[in-house]
Each structure stands twice: as structure tokens, then as C-alpha cells.
Image (tube, rainbow, N blue to C red):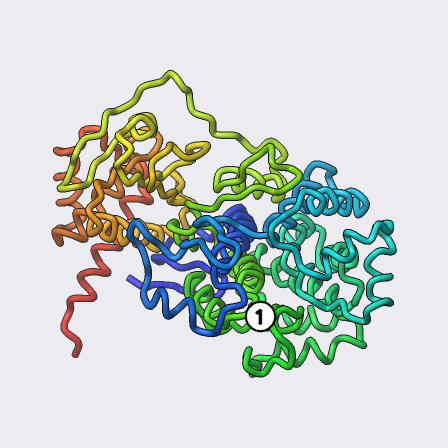
């Protein structure tokens, strides 16, 4: 077996399908929120604080989504970065395009509701009482300072929305949206570059290879500075401003893309920079999410995302809502809600292996609350268990990241079991995806072949369904990889 890992995020076993665009769209939007929530507790802290607290992956009951910080964020709670991004995204999808006055009005409503964290420049512009088309420019003329990262942090949804329109349209939209609060064109050019890199990634291309064309489209008076910050030799230690400025924020995101081999590795790199960790990680998360896709983001992070948008607090945002918004941003105007039948009863949880239980979605929903639940299907929301994780696993042949997803699930199960949790795994019907996971667990823990695992699981779990040939192929490849790993080196 060959393992293919490239910058477009096609990480998995050879023969898997190319990553669907929808996976990248969800990865961009949700990856930005993940970075924001991971970075919030460490905002304005010293370099290395994240790595000192989490020197290794925290996969058990307690994860790197720890919450806290100076503002007391809840675990997985996003900050003003994502709040403003959601306002922008909602305006785009509800208005079916960019209406700057509407976006600005939403920002003002949000500010008036008293969000706990607002950038100084954004606050000053939105609170000025001036119209949307002059407020930021007047602030720049008055202060001479307007190149913060506050417009860059919120722009990923617009990058997704405008990507199908091509480079010129998406870069122009970035400048217009940035100018609502940041009058310095340097900030707008940074947003424009990020828009183009995300656009290329969503199309399955290499964002780093797209940098020369993106920089050629930057206004000449700003091009030199951006060429320097985005050069291959640039490091965050080379920055001449704090990472609250637009240049080192985007520079750090591109640096992490060059240096990291996964979404998680990129997060660790930028979080350990310290300083404006939530914003730098949000920008990096949007870019890396477009590259590695939603399935490339650890489920222990995506599963706990939560927050409200002040002024629009009639809705609580979680992973299910963000996934639906991503579908609408990506062009699916009728994104399904995935609501479950409240009266339906399902398969009662059964202990298949020691500490590993299985059911269907309805059995899991109604199960004892002390289970740690691994959901491998869209549920429409959380069930009420203290620990519930959502794996991005589709019951068809489009799982281009299947090997990585399986490894993520199995590693989390091991950690949760080590913490003394009973683990309940389920998909919608408890058949195909649940059977895949049970077989993979047996192969990992008992060292049996794929055929042996299928036979044993079939005896223990009568709901096993083998219709999905791609799952069988994945297990065969997993077996081949294990055999290769145990072969003596010549």
C-alpha cells in the first residue's frame, strides 16, 4: 500500500476518491471556528503556553478545547472572530450576495449587544455613528492606524461564498468587506490574498503555488510588504509588528501551511506563537481547513464548538449549525436540517467488546448519559451526553480521508477507555459505518485480519451490513499497511 499525503489534503490510502469540494468548504468555515476556540484561552499569553499545557494530544475526556483565559471562555466557545464571521456569512446567504450596508448594520447590532471581546479599532469604527461607507476611512484619517487583523479574522466565509466567481471577484469582495471597519488598504489586500488562497484550495489546488498570481493582483504600493511576509524564507520571528497586525497574522498562517503536515500540526505551530492566538489560529484554521477538509480536523475539536452571536442570541451555534451554514455558503440553498423523529425508538446499546458498545442513532440518543458517544452520522445536534464526538464519515465512496478518520476515532476511543468511559459507537442504522468501526477496532486491538474481523463482528453484531465496498477496501488496505509495518527492514 502507498500512503499519499499532499498539500491538497488527499491523505489516505491509494485508490480513495478525490476530496469533495463540500468537505473543503466545511473545513474552511469550521476550521476557522476551531482555531478561534482553541486560541481563546491563550490570547495575549507568552510563546509556548499551549505546548506547555498540552505537550501531547489530549484525546480523553479533557481535550485541548479547555476554555478559560482572561474572559472565562467555555470549552469550545468561539470569540468575536467567529461571531463577526457568522454575521458576515448570514448576510451573504440570506441576501444572496454582498450588501455592505446590511453587513455593517449587523456588526453595529452586535456591538450594541455588548460582546465580551471586541477589537479596539473595530469598536471605534462601529461606535462612531458614521455611515457604513465613510466610518472606517474617517477613522484612518483621524488616527493613521488601521492595519489590524480584525477584518482578516472574519473573512473566510466570504472567501468561500465568492470563490466560484473567480480570482478577481473574490479578491474585490475581500477589499470591500475589509473596508467596512479597516480603512487601511493594506488590511484589504491581506484579506484579498487570503480569499485567493482559499479559492484555490477549494478547487483542489495548491495555495502556495498560487501565491505569485495572488501577489501580482495586489495593489503595487502594498505588494512589496506582502511579498516579504509571504516569502518561503519568512518566519514569525521575522515580524516587525505584533501578530495583532494583518501582515504577521497572514504570514504566520502561510508559514504554518508550509511547515505543517496536518491541520492539527498547523494549529500547534501557530498557537505556540503566543500573542493574538485566537485570531492567528482562526485565520490559519480557515486556510488549513480548506486544504485538509472537514474530515482532516480532529473530531475532539469540532464536536464541542459552541457560542452565540450577541444581538442575535436567539440561536445557539454548534457543529450541526455550522455544517448547515457551510452547505449554504457552498451553494446548497436547501441544506437539510437532519432532525430526528422524537418518538422513534432504535437499537438498544449492546456491549460488543469490553467497554465498546454499539447501537443506531436512536438507541444512542436515548442511551445512558454516562456513555461517551461516537456519532458517525449527522444527528441534527447533541444528545445531552457529557462526551459526544462527531466523526465526518459518509456512507458512500467519497471518504477521501477515510484512513485518517478511522485513526482519529480509534485513537479517541483508546483515550476515552483509558479515562474509564464506556464508549458507545453508532451511525444512523447501526449497520455499515458502525460495522466498519467495530471491525477496525478489532483489527487494531487483536491484530486479526480484515476477513477475520468481519467474521467475528458479524457474529457479535447481527446488524453488520457489508454493502459499502469502499469500506471493505479500506480495511484490506489497513491490513496491508500493518503487515508492511511489521516486515523486517533489509
Whether residue 23 sits left or right of residue 466 in the image: it is right
Residue name at image x 55 percent, y 59 percent? 282
User: What residue would you read off at disc 1?
Assistant: 208
Q: Is residue 306 above or below residue 40?
A: above
Q: Is residue 196 above or below residue 331?
A: below
* Quadrant where the image shows the N terminus: bottom left
Whether residue 280 sits left or right of residue 458 in the image: it is right
Q: Position of residue 284 (x, y in %)?
A: 54, 63
Q: Position of residue 73 (x, y in %)?
A: 49, 51
Q: Position of residue 458 (x, y in %)?
A: 16, 34
Whether residue 483 sits left or right of residue 309 in the image: it is left
Q: Residues within 10 Å of mark 1 (few under 14, many from 20)?
A: some
Residue name at image x 22 percent, y 52 percent? 414
* Quadrant where the image shows the C terminus: bottom left
Q: Quadrant of residue 106?
A: top right
Q: Is any part of residue 300 visible from this angle?
A: yes
Mark 1 secondary-structure assignment = loop
Residue name at image x 42 percent, y 45 percent? 303
Tell which of 162 and 244 is nearer to you.
Answer: 244
Q: Position of residue 214 (x, y in %)?
A: 69, 68
Q: Is residue 7 above or below residue 397?
A: below
Whether residue 25 sits left or right of residue 96 in the image: it is left
Q: Quadrant of residue 481?
A: bottom left
Tell which of 31 and 385 is nearer to you.
Answer: 385
Q: Is any part of residue 291 visible from this angle?
A: no
Amino acid at each position: 500500500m502507498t500512503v499519499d499525503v499532499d498539500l491538497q489534503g488527499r491523505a489516505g490510502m491509494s485508490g480513495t476518491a478525490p476530496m469533495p469540494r463540500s468537505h473543503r468548504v466545511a473545513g474552511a468555515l469550521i476550521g476557522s471556528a476551531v482555531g478561534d476556540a482553541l486560541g481563546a484561552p491563550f490570547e495575549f499569553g507568552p510563546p509556548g503556553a499551549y505546548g506547555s499545557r498540552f505537550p501531547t494530544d489530549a484525546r480523553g475526556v479533557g481535550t485541548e478545547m479547555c476554555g478559560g483565559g482572561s474572559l472565562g471562555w467555555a470549552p469550545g466557545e468561539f470569540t468575536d472572530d467567529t461571531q463577526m464571521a457568522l454575521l458576515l456569512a448570514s448576510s451573504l446567504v440570506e441576501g444572496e450576495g454582498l450588501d455592505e450596508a446590511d453587513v455593517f448594520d449587523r456588526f453595529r447590532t452586535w456591538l450594541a449587544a455588548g460582546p465580551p471581546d471586541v477589537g479596539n479599532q473595530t469598536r471605534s469604527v462601529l461606535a462612531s455613528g458614521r455611515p457604513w461607507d465613510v466610518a472606517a476611512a474617517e477613522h484612518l484619517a483621524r488616527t493613521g492606524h488601521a492595519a489590524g487583523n480584525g477584518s482578516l479574522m472574519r473573512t473566510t466565509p466570504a472567501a468561500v461564498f465568492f470563490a466560484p466567481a473567480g480570482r478577481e471577484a473574490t479578491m474585490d469582495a475581500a477589499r470591500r468587506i475589509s473596508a467596512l471597519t479597516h480603512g487601511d488598504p493594506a488590511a484589504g489586500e491581506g484579506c484579498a490574498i487570503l480569499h485567493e488562497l482559499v479559492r484555490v484550495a477549494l478547487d483542489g489546488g495548491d495555495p502556495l503555488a498560487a501565491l505569485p498570481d495572488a501577489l501580482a493582483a495586489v495593489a503595487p504600493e502594498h505588494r512589496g510588504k506582502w511579498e516579504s511576509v509571504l516569502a518561503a524564507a519568512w518566519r514569525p520571528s521575522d515580524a516587525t509588528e505584533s501578530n495583532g497586525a494583518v501582515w504577521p497574522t497572514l504570514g504566520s498562517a502561510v508559514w504554518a501551511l508550509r511547515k505543517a503536515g496536518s491541520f492539527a500540526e498547523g494549529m500547534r505551530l501557530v498557537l505556540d506563537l503566543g500573542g493574538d492566538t485566537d485570531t492567528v489560529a482562526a485565520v490559519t484554521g480557515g486556510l488549513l481547513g480548506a486544504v485538509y477538509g472537514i474530515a482532516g480536523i480532529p473530531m475532539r475539536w469540532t464536536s464541542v464548538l459552541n457560542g452565540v452571536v450577541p444581538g442575535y442570541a436567539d440561536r445557539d451555534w454548534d457543529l450541526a449549525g455550522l455544517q448547515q451554514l457551510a452547505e449554504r455558503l457552498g451553494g446548497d440553498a436547501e441544506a437539510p436540517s437532519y432532525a430526528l423523529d422524537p418518538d422513534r425508538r432504535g437499537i438498544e446499546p449492546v456491549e460488543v467488546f469490553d467497554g465498546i458498545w454499539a447501537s443506531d442513532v436512536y438507541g444512542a440518543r436515548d442511551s445512558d448519559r454516562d456513555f461517551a458517544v461516537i456519532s458517525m452520522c449527522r444527528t441534527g445536534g447533541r444528545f445531552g451526553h457529557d462526551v459526544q464526538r462527531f466523526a465526518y464519515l459518509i456512507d458512500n465512496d467519497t471518504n477521501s480521508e477515510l484512513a485518517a478518520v478511522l485513526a482519529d476515532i480509534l485513537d479517541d476511543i483508546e483515550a476515552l477507555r483509558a479515562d474509564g468511559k464506556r464508549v458507545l459507537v453508532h451511525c444512523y442504522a447501526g449497520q455499515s459505518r458502525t460495522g466498519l468501526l467495530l471491525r477496525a477496532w478489532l483489527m487494531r486491538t487483536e491484530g486479526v485480519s480484515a476477513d477475520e474481523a468481519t467474521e467475528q463482528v458479524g457474529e457479535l453484531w447481527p446488524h453488520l451490513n457489508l454493502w459499502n465496498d469502499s469500506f471493505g477496501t479500506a480495511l484490506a488496505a489497513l491490513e496491508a499497511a500493518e503487515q508492511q509495518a511489521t516486515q523486517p527492514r533489509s
